[in-house]
Image (tube, rainbow, N blue to C red):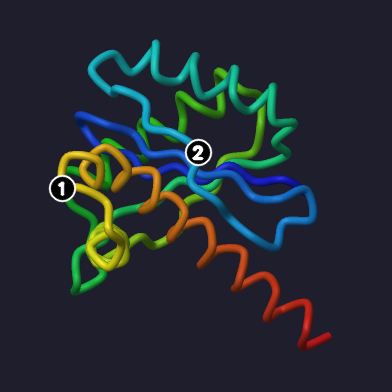
Amino acid sequence: MRFLGVDYGRKRIGLAVSDPSGIFAQPLETVEAADAQSAAARIAALSSERKVDEIVIGLPRNMDDTLGPMADAALAFRDLLAEKTGLPVRTWDERLSSARAERSLRETSMSRARRQKRVNAVAAQVILQAFLDSGKKKREMK
């Protein structure tokens, strides 16, 4: 089963995709988020091209587990993606995913400008890999 990971942001949306077996996530690309309809259409096209079965969108929770305005925006985008793609779209707790992505990119020899272009896609990878790993643990427990 192939998954698409989404790191939703007001300016940019990071995307990651899993391998066909749903074990490993890799960064894919970043989509400009200025126009939600256009962004959702681009993601729908990528989902079709990559033969995605399900989408996982990061849900930004506060540290006290409450939802704020960004979570509301991510949930609205989730609904738009479900409508545009016809695929199931799950949410996944994305707390600190961007910080983890930035930290891992800082450890590379990539320039700051190049890191800024990749951070959203790497954050999507972090979200998607956490989701995939949680399913792997459940499969291993059976």
Looking at the image, which is closer to me, 50 or 8?
Answer: 50
Identity of the residue drawn at 21% across and 31% down: 10
Please state if 74 lies on the left or on the right of 141 as rendered: left
Residue at the spot of label 2? 28
Helix, strand or loop for disc 1: helix
* Up-down relation of residue 64 to residue 7 (above or below): below
Identity of the residue drawn at 27% across and 68% down: 107
Cα distance in 3D space between marks 2 and 1: 19 Å
Which amino acid lies under the numbered mark 2 shown in the image of this protein? Leu
Identity of the residue drawn at 24% across and 59% down: 102
Which amino acid lies under the numbered mark 1 shown in the image of this protein? Arg
Disc 1 crowd rating (10 Å Cα; few below 14, some 14-19, many 20+) is few
Residue at the spot of label 1? 112
Looking at the image, which is closer to me, 83 or 106?
Answer: 106
The quarter of the rendered structure image containing the C terminus is bottom right
- How many numbered marks have been drawn onto this rendered protein structure? 2
Where, by quadrant of the figure, is residue 54 drawn? Answer: top right
Q: Position of residue 91 (x, y in %)?
A: 47, 51
Helix, strand or loop for disc 2: strand
Q: Earlier in the sequence, mark 2 or mark 1?
A: 2
